[in-house]
Image: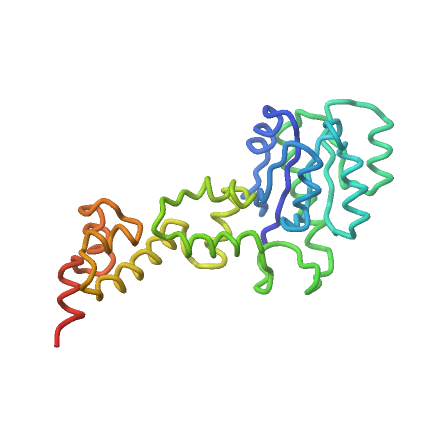
Amino acid sequence: MTYRVMLIDDEPWAMVYLKQTFNWEDRGFVIASEESNAKDALDSVKDVRPDVIFTDIRMPGLTGLELMNEVRTLGIECEFVIMSGFAEFSYAQEAITLGAFEYCLKPIAADKADRLLVRLRERLGAKPKSSEEPYGLALPNERNLKFEDMLDYIQSNIQDKLHLKELANQFYLNSNYCCHLFNKYTGKTFTEYVTELRMKKAAGLLANHRLTIEEAGSESGYPDYFYFNKVFKKYYGQTPSEYRKAVNQP
C-alpha cells in the first residue's frame, strides 16, 4: 500500500527540504501534489485525495490551520502534519484541537522525519478501508479524473510533441505522481505509453497508400523520417516500407 502526500509551503527552500529530508518512497509514500499556498491546496484536495497533508502554518490568504479546518468541514478524511518555523504554544494547541497528527518545527532532522513517517504509516494502516473513501494507491477501483483527462488529451494529440512535465503542469498533477499513475493504470512508463499509441497509429496510416511514409510518420508524432524508421523497426521488427508491403500483399 502506497499513501499519497500533499505538500504545502510558500517558501521554496522549505519545499525542497521537505522533499529531500523525508524517505518518502522507502516508507511507502508518494508525493501526489505540491502547492505553494493553502488556497490552491483547498481547490485541488478533492481531486488529489491525499492520505496525509504536510502544511506550513503562516501563508498568504489562508493559514495551514484554517486549511485543516476547511478540509475537515468538507468531510475529507486525511491526516495533517503541521510544519512551522514558530515554536508558539498557541499554534500547537490549536493544531492538536483540530486533530493534527503532529506539530513539527522546521527544519526537521532527518532521523525525526523518518520516525514520523513510520508512525504515520502505522496510523494510516490501522484505519478502516471504505469503497467510497479509499486510502492509498493500491485499490483497483480508484480513479483520478485529472489523469484520465490527461490520457484523453494524449490520445487526441498524439501527433504533437508531448512532454510529461508540461502535461503534468497542464493538468495540475505532480510529475513524479504521474509516473506512478502511468505504471498503475497502464502498466507502462509515459514514454512506453506514448510510443505504443504512436506506433499503432503509424501502422494504421501505413496501410493507406494515399500517404507517404514521411506523412504517416509526421501524423504519428515523428516529423523526423529517419528517427521514425528507427523507432518503428525497433517496435515492429520491420521498417515502415517493409511493413507497408507486408500488409498490402494480395
Image quadrant in which you'd find residue 83: top right
Q: Quadrant of the N terminus?
A: bottom right
Q: Is residue 71 above or below residue 207?
A: above
Q: Residue at x 50, y 47 (%)?
A: 178
Image quadrant in which you'd find residue 40: top right
Say how the picture is coloured: rainbow
Q: Is residue 126 above or below residue 115?
A: below
Counting from the top left corner in percent of width and height, residue 101 is at 76, 41
Q: Residue at x 62, y 26 (%)?
A: 14
Of 69 and 92, the residue lying toward us:
69
Of 247 and 195, the residue lying toward us:
247
Q: Residue furthest front?
A: 210
Q: Residue at x 75, y 51 (%)?
A: 76
Q: Residue at x 45, y 59 (%)?
A: 186
Counting from the top left corner in percent of width and height, residue 67 is at 76, 38
Q: Is residue 204 above or below residue 99?
A: below
Counting from the top left corner in percent of width and height, residue 10 is at 65, 27
Q: How many marks?
A: 0
Counting from the top left corner in percent of width and height, residue 149 is at 52, 54
On the rendered structure, is 39 left or right of 92?
left
On the rendered structure, is 34 left or right of 243?
right
Q: Quadrant of the C terminus?
A: bottom left
Of 149 and 234, the residue lying toward us:
149
Q: Is residue 75 above or below residue 131?
A: above
